[in-house]
Amino acid sequence: MTERTIGIDYIARVEGEGALKVRIQNNHVEDVQLKIFEPPRFFEAFLRGRSYLEAPDITARICGICPVAYQMSSVHAMERALGMKVGGQIRELRRLLYCGEWIESHPLHIFLLHAPDFLGYPDAIHMAKDYPDAVKLGLALKKVGNSLMTLLGGREIHPINVRVGGFYRAPTVNELKAFRPQLVEAMKLAETTVHFTADLDFPNIEEDYEFVSLRHEREYPLCDGDLVSSKGIKVPQDRWDDVFEEVQAPYANALQSVRKGGGTSYLVGPLARYALNRDHLSPRADQLAREVGLENVVRNPYRSVVVRAVETVYAIEEALRIIDQYERPDPSWVEPPPVTKSVTGGAVSEAPRGILYHRYRIGPGGLIEDAKIVAPTSQNQKRIEDDVRHLVERSLALDDPALTNACERAIRNHDPCISCATHFLKLDIERR
Amino acid sequence: MSEPAPTNPARTLPLPLIIGLGNDQRSDDRSGLEVARALRPLLAGKARVEECESEGIALLELWRGSDHVLVIDAVRSGAAPGTVHRLEPGDGFLPGFRSVTSTHGLSLAEAVALARGLGCLPRRLVVYGIEADDVRMGAELTPPVAHGVQEVTDRILAELEAEAAVGGSPDA
């Protein structure tokens, strides 16, 4: 009887740090555990007793990579709780800010974290020696995203200009127009990126995912739309708790999200958004997806890198559209009504890595009584375990170092931001 | 007719750039940010001071065009908490210099290596590391690390003053 354990103490090139443990007995995969050591719901506890107006700025600090997602989910949850409707140019500016985050985050993952896997380098530093232009291209695109976030958010990390009801200050038409050339230049880089990613070599693997994302009647989703899945879910986005639940994994300090009832995994992020919203891509993004032969539903997790590139084109094209139709909103925010009774509101938005759910209960006077935050990575956690299990079942002939490396790749396919959901993390593969 | 204003070559040199790295929410991982905050009012007009809570890649953008850069970050090398390390990476590496909580996509050491590979490392880079103790969620420095923050603040002031006295950075 042989037992084999493979462990990775921390997963390189993943935001934050993580650990995976795989146990193999008699060439059968007994167990896969993606461990997430979460600071136990620190932010949810920290928010209780604070003014609901503080939530966007406090939650933005959960993640240095996707602060806009935290701000957008929190302001929409608060506005839903208060029965506010925010539309027009304020809504457009929010989409523009979110585009900045996608333009910043996707190239970071594509070039600095994911591409080394395909090109056979341990990391971007080694890759940069042979592919300096690719790394510089990624950095240049990321910079445009950062600059757009700075323009709208006040600063790029933990933006401070977002408030419940809108923005403290809306940019002028000229400020946005002046940004246009940077986006036009970025579009060329993003088009190159689509071709660069499509030309990589992909393992020939497909998974049977239940894709979950927002879906809006006429646009590729960022903040609005229903919560839908490829296996039949369709509910208003504030009904997340009706269809999903969080369960405590015995080995992890974090909660895992599963389908309510069946307890099965599901996938959020670019593959899911794309599969469920392919018909709402902008013209150039649509054309590029066709040019590189990207099918309408991509079930190969490795090819998520191409979908991220297509979504980057979408974000740039959408940003240009918003700038071209922009009129400065005055006032720049809708005044929230006084909170006279206990109210609850939930909202979902599309972080680069997938849907981020916030739900708040606000008491009379406006203090937060209860907060729930479900990050995309904790929603993908169980699904990543399933991917790793299938990978190991297919790859038992590999020696431990090769198998460990393959497991890391399988995890990185989903761009997990473990620092959002968690803190330190480690990885183990055990063969018996 | 007035005399043309005398030009002071020192004035035309770009100001040194000080970057405090860290995560404000993780106790001792905020030490670099605290040094930046302490230095900012003391170095007005003499240096540019930035705080960076992003991943290490942001450094490549922050220090673009700067000739003389000082970076302060929390570090764990096994030394006693609050211990101050001073390194000039030059052509070498930063051994053991890994961001404490790794919410940065790349650590400081990785960012330096990447910048070197891409040929965009500042001509003169000084790294101060402050040995961390507690990096759990929290907004307070542990006492030894608070002491380290004061020490680094004082040493950077002295370092910049000494260089100003000799008219710029020693190898200028």
Image (cartoon, rainbow, N blue to C red):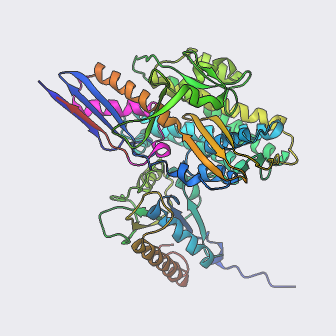
Residue visible at 50% across and 60% down? B22
Q: Nearer the viewer, residue A391 or A368?
A: A368
For residue A397: magenta? yes
User: Going by the picture, which residue comes out furthest to the left?
Assistant: A1
The span shown in magenta is A396-424
User: Could you tell me residue A30's position as x and y percent?
Assistant: 26, 25
Residue visible at 34% across and 31% down? A407
For residue A309: magenta? no
Question: Can residue A200 be seen from the camera position used here?
Answer: no
Q: Nearer the viewer, residue A66 or A164?
A: A164
User: Could you tell me residue A224's position as x and y percent?
Assistant: 70, 31
Q: Nearer the viewer, residue A344 or A220?
A: A344
Looking at the rendering, in which quadrant would you find the C terminus of chain A?
A: top left
Residue visible at 20% across and 21% down? A27
User: Could you tell me residue B166's position as x and y percent?
Assistant: 52, 83
Q: Is residue A196 left or right of residue A7?
A: right
Residue visible at 59% across and 64% down? B50
Q: Nearer the viewer, residue A132 or A114?
A: A114
Q: Tag count in the figure?
A: 0
User: Could you tell me residue A130's position as x and y percent?
Assistant: 42, 39
Q: Is residue A19 left or right of residue A141?
A: left
Looking at the rendering, in which quadrant would you find the N terminus of chain A?
A: top left
Question: Can residue A270 be seen from the camera position used here?
Answer: yes
Q: Is residue A430 left or right of residue A19?
A: left
| Picture layout, residue A107 above or below residue A196 | below
| Picture layout, residue B160 above or below residue A162 | below
Query: Residue A10 lies in what quarter of the image?
Result: top left
Q: Is residue A175 left or right of residue B24?
A: right
